[in-house]
Each structure stands twice: as C-alpha cells, then as structure tokens.
Amino acid sequence: MRHGIVRHTLEGVPDARISTHPFTTSDGLALHLTRFQRGESDDVVLLMHGLTASSDLFIMPEHYNMATYLLDHGFSDVWTVDLRMSNRYPYNTEPGDSSIDDVVHYDHPAMMDELRRHVGQRRIHVVAHCLGSASFCMSLAAGTVTGIASMVAQSVGLVVKVPGWSRWKIELAPPLLEHALGLSAIDPRMGASARFTRSWALSKLVSLGHPECDNSACHLVSLMWGAGWPALYSHANLEPRTHDRIADLLGPTGLHYYRHIRKMVRAGHAVKYDPGDRRHAALPDDYLAHAADISTPILFMTGQNNHVFSDSNVVCHQELDRVVPDRHEVAVLPGYGYLDPIIGKKAHLDVFPLILDFIRRRAV
C-alpha cells in the first residue's frame, strides 16, 4: 500500500456520526447509503458517484473533501450513496446487459425511499458526478425521482458529447475487447495481472502511448474514459497519493454500459438503451425531450479541460435554458478537467465554494 490509505476508509470525515443504511432495488440488488451527521438540518445533501467510482470520491482523507467541506459550512447532514455502478460492489463486472436505464428505473427510486425514510420531507440537494449525474438528470426527466430542491450536475447531464478519439474507442472497443481479446471487462488494475496474459499485455500496450507518468492504472483509466495524457484530470491538480491510488477510486466495468453510452453519443443526448425492453416501458425513449418537465434547478458544472465529455454540460444548459429560461445555471472551471473538480487538492478553494453558494441559494 504505497500511498498509505486504506481502501474504502471513512477516516476522511472526522467529527461526524457515521451510519450505513442498506436498501434493495426492485430488481434485487443490495445497495447502501452512508450518512455523515453533525446535527439536525433543514437541508440534506446527497453526494453521488459515477460509473466505476464510488462514494470514496467525496470522503478522501488526503485532501479537504466535499463531504467534510459541506459539514464545515453549515450543512450538518450529508449522505453518500453507492449505486450498482459503484466499485464497492461486484455488479459492474458480472455478466448481463446492465444499462443506465436500470439505475434510473431501479436504483434512484429505492435510494430516495430509503433516504426519505430517515429525513422525511426536508429539502434534499444532490451533487452528482459523471454517469451518476447523467442518470439522475434522466430520473428527473423521467419522473422516477421528484421533490429535489437542487442539483449540481458535474461533467455531463442530458447532452452527451465526447472527443473524436473517444467516439472511435466507444464504437470499436466493446467488440474488439470481447471478441478479439476475450475480455468481458476492463480494469485499471490490469497492469498487475500475471505476465504475458491478455490483461497484462493490454496494459503494457496502453502504457506505450502514455509517457506522462509511470502509473499503469492512470493510463488505463485514460483508455477507459477519455482522450488525453492523462484524460481525466491534470496531474498538477492531484495530491501524489491520490494519483498513486487511482485504481482504488476508479474500478473495473463490464462493457455493456459502454453500449448505452455509445447509443447516447450517437444521438447526442440521453436516450433509452432498448425501446423494446418491457422492463423499462415507463421510461421515455428520449430523455432530453422531457427536459421542460424538470422543475429542480440544476447547476451544470464542467472543467474547461474536460477530455471525457467535452462541453456536454455547456450545451445541455443552452438546451434547457431555451425551453425553461433562467431555471438552470452553468459553471465552467478554468484549469480543471473531468474528475479533478471532485478529487483535486485545491477543489475546496476553486470548486466547492461554487457548489456551496448554489445550494445555499436553494436552501430557503
């Protein structure tokens, strides 16, 4: 453990009462919420991760993390959630046809039922990242979740745009990895595989194109999610220990989620994966078409150097502002990329105050 940080540690949020709250989705998955509480509050903040990440993004001990920042600045009841996309579970790499529609239809309603069971009708504010953000925006558009006081949508929402190199990867990677290499999942830890295995060889090949550092997990998450050297963040924005443990923060995933993302990239916005899937018949085929139905004010946030979803959130704000003027806001973060607005060593100075201000203005 070169970085000296225990995986899934809760030590990054001191002086809080910590409790775990399991819940079960209607399709039979066990998930959980974690509560960090210092007192009673009229406003509750829920922090939501994206695909292959987890609640760890918000409670990291090596920097002033978002959960502690919110607790220190007047929001004394902060929750995190681990959805089916979390690397704390094995679900990401199990065989199946998981899609983001499953998160919209099953995870979010069950999550909100459990949260409401504890906080009642108090105001709930959501801060979500990546596909946690996209899926929650989709839930608001579909009406599977209602009554949210505000939302911060980090990196991507209902519009899905990626760099050109990423478009090629998302088109070719699932069939290439599955059928040519015989891999059903991709994992940042592939560099630690046994020598001369397919996983080890793929990691070595990817690292040949990433001379910017010596961390093979960093190279692999660039392959998995973006276009750049590195793709997800600026090295200068991270604590060295954060860079060392990037494989703890971003885990493996099966390839079927990529197929849903690919379909949304082709459409340019959030759409249902399979309109013929009877399980999800109640969900809209086109989520963006229901954007006017979203009454929750949203701050669409993105790093200026987002090499994963590029300017998706800027365009999304333009689209929503056209149909419901002045309901939503947008913030572009100079010097930041895709993930460092959450895990960056100076995010508490550059990013979290913007989130705090937005939530405070809706906490009335």
Image (cartoon, helix red, strand yellow):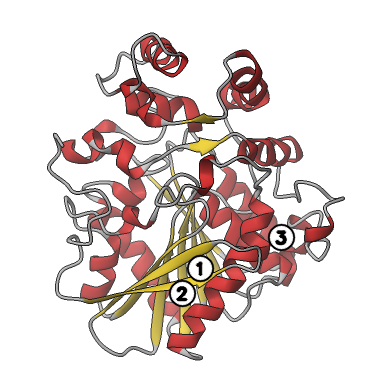
Identity of the amino acid at label 3?
Arg
Identity of the amino acid at label 1?
Met
Residue 310 in sight from this viewpoint: no
Q: Residue at x 18, y 55 (%)?
A: 61
Identity of the amino acid at label 2?
His
Q: CA distance from mark 2 to mark 3?
A: 24 Å
Q: Secondary structure at mark 2?
A: strand
Q: Image check: 186 left or right of 216?
A: right
Which one is earlier in the sequence, the residue at label 2 or at label 3? 2
Can you identify the residue that label 3 sits on? 322
User: Is 44 rendered above or below residue 228?
Assistant: below
Can you identify the residue that label 1 sits on? 151
Quarter-of-image position of residue 319: bottom right
Which one is earlier in the sequence, the residue at label 1 or at label 3? 1
Q: Secondary structure at mark 3?
A: helix
Circles 2 and 1 in contact, beta carbons < 8 Å: yes
Q: Residue at x 55, y 23 (%)?
A: 183
